[in-house]
């Protein structure tokens, strides 16, 4: 009789362990959840970026299904090559858990000059007679050659007067009725202005005679807006 009781208690313990621990992992059929994911990244040349994900079935693996030339990748960490400013990398990232559940994400990475006030910059206003969408502006600067790109928000912020001298008097929103402010000229940046504009995802930097250098407030449907294009490169 005692032997039967021990056997029953032993089975009871096994059942409790199964309910409390392994069942949730065994039933896991969902792909990992990426943390803070963006499908467009703006990274200074020579820097690293690490993708993050969460899943109960550890470990999580990161692989590139189409690894671009010269882009270093080590299980979730990307290293942007030096001297790659102006380059764009299109990658297909696969994130998988230990059970084989996975999710694929397309990511575009834009390489820019590092935020360094000691790097002299040359700005060039492109085709002042016309305005362009953001995607077209990116391509225009890349087509100027190696090293050219749309400016970052930081670069515009650090060189407000220099860029304003290029665009002053150009009415980029085609609205001549801007009150005492006069013409307001807006130029595209390569990256959003989260850190400078209370979380807004605006990508344009505007200039007027009274306030030089402010985020366009805000751009609604920014990919449908058209603005003038200013490109930047490191001064030779």
Image (spheres, rainbow, N blue to C red):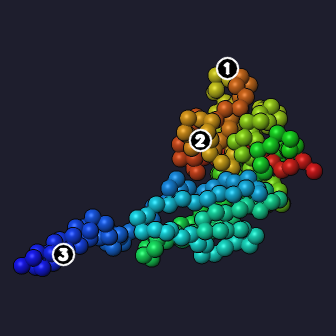
Check the image and report above or below for 132 versus 143: above
Q: Secondary structure at mark 2?
A: helix
Residue 171 can be seen, yes or no? no
Find disc 2 in the rendering and name its residue: 194
- Residue sitting farthest toward the top: 180
Contact, mark 3 vs mark 2 (Cβ under 8 Å): no
Q: Secondary structure at mark 3?
A: helix
Find disc 1 in the rendering and name its residue: 180
- Residue sitting farthest toward the right: 236
- Residue 80 coordinates in the image, percent (x, y): 73, 61
Find disc 3 in the rendering and name its residue: 11
- Residue 142 coordinates in the image, percent (x, y): 77, 59
Label 2 or label 1, whichever lies nearer to me, is: 2
Q: Secondary structure at mark 1?
A: helix
Contact, mark 3 vs mark 1 (Cβ under 8 Å): no
- Residue sitting farthest toward the front: 2
Q: Which residue sits at x=10%, y=79%? A: 4
Check the image and report above or below for 162 versus 102: above
The front one of 173 and 211 is 211
Q: Which residue sits at x=78%, y=51%? A: 113
Q: CA distance from mark 3 to mark 1?
A: 84 Å
Which badge, 3 or 2, is on the more N-terminal residue?
A: 3
Q: Which residue sits at x=46%, y=71%? A: 97
Q: CA distance from mark 3 to mark 2?
A: 57 Å
Q: CA distance from mark 2 to mark 1?
A: 29 Å
């Amino acid at each position: 009789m005692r032997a039967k009781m021990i056997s029953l208690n032993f089975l009871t313990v096994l059942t409790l362990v199964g309910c409390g621990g392994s069942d949730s992992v065994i039933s896991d059929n969902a792909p990992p959840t990426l943390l803070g994911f963006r499908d467009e990244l703006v990274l200074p040349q020579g820097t690293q970026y690490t993708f993050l994900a969460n899943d109960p079935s550890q470990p999580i693996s990161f692989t590139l299904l189409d690894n671009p030339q010269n882009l270093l990748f080590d299980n979730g960490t990307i290293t942007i090559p030096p001297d790659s400013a102006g380059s764009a990398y299109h990658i297909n990232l696969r994130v998988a858990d230990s059970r084989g559940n996975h999710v694929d994400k397309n990511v575009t990475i834009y390489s820019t000059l590092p935020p360094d006030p000691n790097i002299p910059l040359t700005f060039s206003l492109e085709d002042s007679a016309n305005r362009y969408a953001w995607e077209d502006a990116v391509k225009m600067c890349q087509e100027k050659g190696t090293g050219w790109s749309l400016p970052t928000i930081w670069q515009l912020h650090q060189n407000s007067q220099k860029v304003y001298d290029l665009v002053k008097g150009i009415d980029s929103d085609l609205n001549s009725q801007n009150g005492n402010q006069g013409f307001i000229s807006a130029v595209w940046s390569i990256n959003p202005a989260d850190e400078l504009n209370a979380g807004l995802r605006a990508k344009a930097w505007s200039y007027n005679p009274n306030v030089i250098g402010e985020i366009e407030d805000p751009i609604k449907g920014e990919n449908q807006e058209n603005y003038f294009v200013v490109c930047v490169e490191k001064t030779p």
